[in-house]
Amino acid sequence: MKRIHILLMALVALSIQGCQNDFNVPSEQASRSYEQDAEVLNRFVDINKTTHEYYINPNKRTTALSYITNDGAEELAVVNSLNLDVFQQSVDRVSKLSGQFASNHGVDYVVMMTGNEVYVSRIKSDSPIVLERMNENEATRSYYPRTASLKVTDSEKEYTVYGSGDIETSIELFPQAYKNAGWAFLVSCEMKENGNRQMVNVLFCGVGYRMIAPRFAWHAAQPDTEWNFGVASSCDNTTTIARLNISHP
């Protein structure tokens, strides 16, 4: 897939520092562990749906009690400044990536996630697919009989589905691989409909971790579409930051 290689070069060029081997976190100098503070900070991350960027919102209400008290500000006040700087750098890198791909119309969709939100943004109005988030109240597993799993690493993984108008995907994140901060990967799909080939590219990115694996439905115009999926992350090592599950008839 020539197209995914071109986009992957752009992905790597923006270099998200979120992979285990190139993400240095404070140790002796920090009064609190990075893992402890990252868990707190993740609860205050919000999505700017206009610019496709992430930011830490100190006024975010993270619990029912926070609407009555000011416990959120108290939580943020005890976060170590060194840990905050490292976490913010990771958030900024993901924001730069998603913002640039959106503004340059480099992908068909940008899917942005936080610990409590999933935002699907259609970037290209003429995209040959409709990508939708599936309701988390529905069954946690696909009803489709076939499922393939692709590990999201620096090397491209591929999978082909023949003769189907609808596909389901789900994402299992491995937060230890990206230090529970920023992450991103690119899914590219070469579609074949009625003999015509079209390329679809979707940037999946986020900050933190979702307990429930988000699921997405991919809809094509033709029921006998051929889907050639490829996936790769911006990590420059073999660390697996996520698993993309592809389900189909």
Image: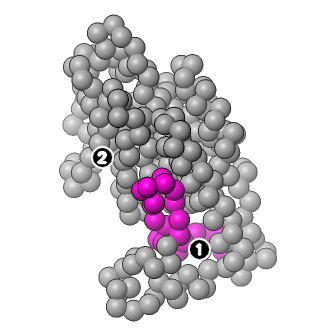
SS state under label 1: helix
Q: Residue furthest right?
A: 29
Magenta segment: does it hold 43?
Answer: yes
Figure quadrant of residue 220? top left
Residue drawn 50% across the image and 78% down it: 58
Which residue is disc 1 drawn over? 36
Q: Would residue 121 appear left or right of 90 to someone viewing this image?
A: left
Could you tell me which residue is drawn at 66 percent across and 61 percent down?
89
Q: Three-letter amino acid code at disc 1?
A: Gln
Among the two numbered marks 1 and 2 on one chain, the one whose residue lies closer to the N terminus: 1
Q: Is residue 89 left or right of residue 224?
A: right
The segment highlighted magenta reads 32-56
Residue name at image x 32 percent, y 82 percent:
64
Within 10 Å of the Cα at label 2, are there few (<14), some (14-19), or many (20+) other Cα atoms? some
User: Can you name the residue that lies furthest to the top here?
Assistant: 195
Tell me if residue 205 is in the magenta stretch.
Answer: no
Residue at the far bottom in the pictured view: 69
User: Pointer 1: residues within 10 angstroms few (<14), some, or many (20+)?
Assistant: few
Q: Position of residue 66 (x, y in %)?
A: 38, 85
Residue 242 visible to the viewer: no
Q: Is any part of residue 89 visible from this angle?
A: yes
Residues 125 and 197: in front is 125
Quarter residue 13 falls in: top right
Apparent side of residue 28 relative to residue 71 in the rendered image (left or right): right
Query: Residue 157 placed where, x, y %?
Result: 53, 28
The residues tagged by marks 1 and 2 sit, at their Cα atoms, a distance apart of: 30 Å
Asked if the residue at tag 2 contacts the one at tag 1, i.e. Cβ–Cβ closer than 8 Å, the answer is no
Q: Which residue is mark 2?
A: 133
x and y, in percent, of residue 136 in the image: 26, 54
Task: Please identify the quadrant where the C terminus is shown.
Answer: top left
Q: Name the residue located 60 percent from the left edge and 32 percent from the top edge.
A: 8
Q: Amino acid at mark 2?
A: Arg
